[in-house]
Amino acid sequence: MTRSVTILGATGSVGEQTLDLIKREPEAWQVEALTANCSAPELAQMAKDCGAKLAVVGDESCLPPLREALAGTDIETAGGQAALIEAAQRPVDMTVAAIVGCAGLAPVMAAVERGGSLALANKEALVSAGEILMSAAAKHGATLLPTDSEHNAIFQCLAGNDIDEVRSITLTASGGPLRTWSTEQLAEATPAEAVAHPNWSMGAKISVDSATMFNKGLELIEAYYLFPVGLDKIRIVVHPQSVIHSMVEYRDGSTLAQLGPSDMRVPIASCLAYPARMETPMAPLDLAAIGTLSFEAPDEERFPATRLARQAAAAGGAMPATLNAANEVAVEAFLDGQIGFSRISAIVEEIMASCDHAAPLTSLEDVLALDAEMRARTRALVEI
Ligand code: NDP
């Protein structure tokens, strides 16, 4: 049976890996829509390769090159924020949410409000609007399938079990490329060094997040919303080999873990085929060749991000969205060479301390307004 799929953020790392899987089973999938921000030639090529019906760029100024690249085909084109939302609203069997950043929130919300199944990689959307997204998913009967490898692992370890029986959830963290660096070395880390992840191949933003440990911080908040066991039951352990993707411990002392290669196609496939399974091209896991799996406690002195994320989740309200907005702007500034590596967490902490929003965020508009305000505040701090 053919299933229809839309990929939001198709030109990114997760988007490309999703398309790689889909192209291996062309008879099983009909691609409805593919979106990008401004990578028009790449998007056009992908749309042609997989026979998509619609290609959308979020940045309207990139629509003319998209139209030009798709001239003479019957693939529809569109541009701008409203077009992204319209693409997310089209009825499909599966939406893959792989836009990076809070920019993906409105399209994710549009897909959730339509109901149906959503493979959610776009963690910043969930961090910024956790309660709103989760209650919208419940209200509209949407199935949220966690695509982040850790959350996908937890989702698999929870299957068939009662969440009330969970004693703890442990998120594993590779520790990133700078795991063993001293505080002094971290202050001098360059963008090239920060994005050189030892295990995973990912987009630039999440690669920097992995180096600062904000990725694990965002994941802690993501897990808090996805798996309602309580913040005190969610732990983090550094596991440099990235073989165990996360674990769930039950009250009888049994711990279930999900293992696999460090390749996003495994969790993506688990979402695409859910609740069944599909083939992936990865070699079988060879534990004898890997030899050693090691674990260590996170060092929150050198990497304060997980401490800040725990504070943000505990505070709730506007704080998780504030942390996310400040981090997005600080990462961009670091990648542009405007600030040093260690300034990222310092800036996030400063913006969180300045967050004076006592009122809870109750709508998408509230979150987007707060996100814009905190971005402006962070930009002002970066430019000092
Ligand atoms: P990339 O940077 O590789 O790709 C991001 C995608 O989003 C691109 O298609 C990009 O389009 C699009 N995009 C960027 N900004 C906007 C915008 N303002 N409006 C609309 N579209 C936009 O990111 P990744 O694939 O690495 O990550 C995507 C999400 O998945 C992130 O939330 C990340 O945290 C999460 N994730 C990623 C993993 C990975 O292995 N990469 C693992 C787990 C989670 P364009 O090409 O035009 O810029």
Image: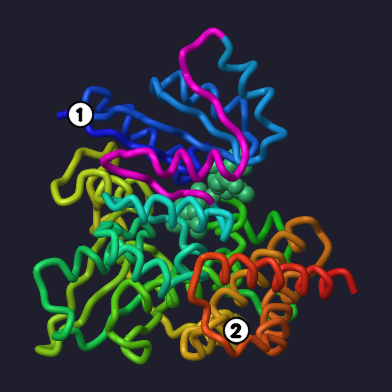
Closer to the camera, 209 or 2?
2
Q: Which residue lies furthest to the right in this view?
A: 384
Q: What is the three-letter code of the residue carrying label 2?
A: Pro
Circle 2 sits in a helix, a strand or a loop, which is it?
A: loop
Q: For this view, does 354 lie left or right of residue 31?
A: right
Closer to the camera, 262 or 332?
332
Establish if 11 lies above or below 314.
Answer: above
| Residue at (39, 34) in percent of width and height | 19
Picture quadrant where residue 167 is located? bottom left
x and y, in percent, of residue 170 in the image: 32, 79
Q: For this view, does 276 lie left or right of residue 123?
A: left
x and y, in percent, of residue 85 in the image: 50, 45
Picture quadrant where residue 177 is located? bottom right
| Residue at (46, 43) in percent of width and height | 8
* Label 2 vs label 1, nearer the camera: 1
- Disc marking residue 158: none
Establish if 100 lies above or below 229.
Answer: above
Q: Are marks 2 and 1 in contact (CB under 8 Å)?
A: no
Check residue 194 for magenta coloring: no
Residue beneath disc 1: 2
| Residue at (58, 79) in percent of width and height | 305
The answer to whether mark 2 is within 8 Å of ligand 1 is no
Residue beneath disc 2: 304
Q: What is the three-letter code of the residue carrying label 1?
A: Thr
Mark 2 burial class by Cα count in 10 Å: few <14, some 14-19, many 20+: some
x and y, in percent, of residue 1 in the image: 14, 29
| Residue at (38, 33) in percent of width and height | 20
Check residue 83 for magenta coloring: yes
The residue stretch that appears in magenta: 72-99
